[in-house]
Amino acid sequence: MKLGYTIVYVPDVAESLSFFERAFGLSRRFLHEAGDYGELDTGATTLAFASLALGHMNFPAGFVAASASALPLGFELALVTPHVAEAHAKALANGATELNPPESKPWGQTVSHVRCPDGTLVELCSPVGG
């Protein structure tokens, strides 16, 4: 078993892809012509976005959309960079909301948290032990 995909259900797939491209420098791998599904090039594990409509199709009994929640959901996407402060500032400049500014942790890692316009919680962090 290995982790293959992380899929976030969002109101506007193209806009979420564009935000992640602008704010975090990730590259778009794919956007379906219907606009309901798209992927970013993030390495071995795929970060994907799917429309709320697909979410409702997959979960007819309902689900909690990050974009509809006043509080961030209880999971985060962690993006690793040696330049946390710069990445944090770039995310804010592109429309993210600051939850926690960059902070040095006792184990030597620098960590910050932002919330994307689509509600996704992102941790920006330096490599562990680096």
Image (cartoon, rainbow, N blue to C red):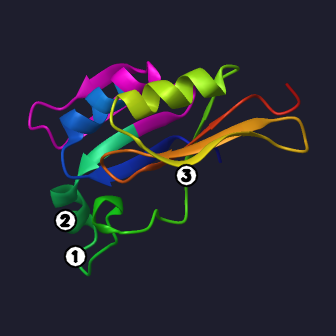
> Which one is earlier in the sequence, the residue at label 2 or at label 3?
2
Per the rendered image, the range of residues in magenta is 22-47
Contact, mark 1 vs mark 2 (Cβ under 8 Å): yes
Q: What amino acid is found at the position of numbered circle 3 in the picture? A: Glu
Taking the magenta stretch, the answer to whether it contains residue 35 is yes
Expressed as whole percent of the image width and height from the top left, the position of residue 8 reads 37, 50
Q: Which residue is mark 3?
A: 76
Q: Is residue 45 above or below residue 24?
A: below
Residue visible at 40% across and 26% down? 23
Q: Is residue 123 left or right of residue 13?
A: right
Residue depth check, mark 1 versus mark 3: number of the one nearer the observer: 3
Q: Nearer the viewer, mark 2 or mark 3?
A: 3
Residue tagged by mark 1? Answer: 60
Q: Pointer 3: residues within 10 angstroms few (<14), some, or many (20+)? A: some
Q: Quadrant of residue 9?
A: bottom left
Where disc 1 sits, the SS reads loop
**Amino acid on which disc 2 is placed:** Met
Say if residue 20 shows up in the picture.
yes
Give the residue at mark 2: 57
